Amino acid sequence: METRPYFVLGDFAVNIVAGVVVASISAALFGPGWNMVLAMIVAMALGMLISLPLALLSGALFGAMEVMVPVMTTGMVAGMVVSMSAAMGEIAFGSAAGLGASSGVGVTVATYLANVVIKGRAVRWTS
């Protein structure tokens, strides 16, 4: 993963946008009539499909592999969290967008932390 500010801020921005878009669509599609587990599974797949065009477009600016994994994961997480919340009770678009943005930030931080751990272990494995 890149550590230069342009790429780090770009990763956060793209993930937040992906989270907000997926969460908003999930809030509109899912409601209390859905089974929670079914809503989660459908929204995970839908979140990946919705995130794919954004990942492809932003990959040219911020690096294809650096953007693809976190954005697709953000789509899955945001879709899953919001659809399960919507299955328990109606959720407002503002709340859904907030959950999506939080999902984007959380996934980006988790991806960067995982990268640090993996790179640290790779030094031991390859030396």
Image (cartoon, rainbow, N blue to C red):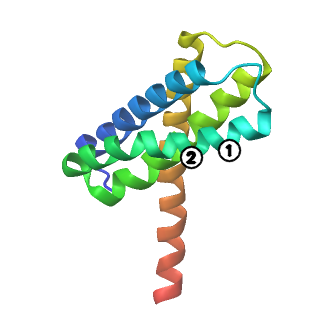
- The image position of residue 8, as x and y in percent, is 33, 43
Q: Count the marks: how many?
A: 2
Name the disc covering residue 41, or none. Answer: 1
Instruction: Give left or right: position of 17 versus 103.
Output: left
Residue pictured at 59% horizontal, 20% vertical: 27
Residue pictured at 52% horizontal, 40% vertical: 47
Q: Is residue 90 above or below residue 41?
A: above
- The image position of residue 98, as x and y in percent, is 54, 19
Does the residue at mark 2 contact the one at mark 1 (Cβ under 8 Å)?
A: yes
Residue pictured at 66% horizontal, 13% vertical: 91
Q: Nearer the viewer, residue 10 or 127?
A: 10
Q: Is residue 119 above or below residue 51?
A: below
Q: Is residue 125 above or below residue 52?
A: below
- The image position of residue 107, as x and y in percent, is 53, 43
- Pointer 1 local density, CA inside 10 Å: few below 14, some 14–19, many at least 20: some
- The image position of residue 43, as x and y in percent, is 61, 38
Residue pictured at 26% horizontal, 55% vertical: 63
In the rendered image, which residue does mark 2 sit on?
45
- Amino acid carrying label 1: it is Ile
Name the disc covering residue 117, or none. Answer: none
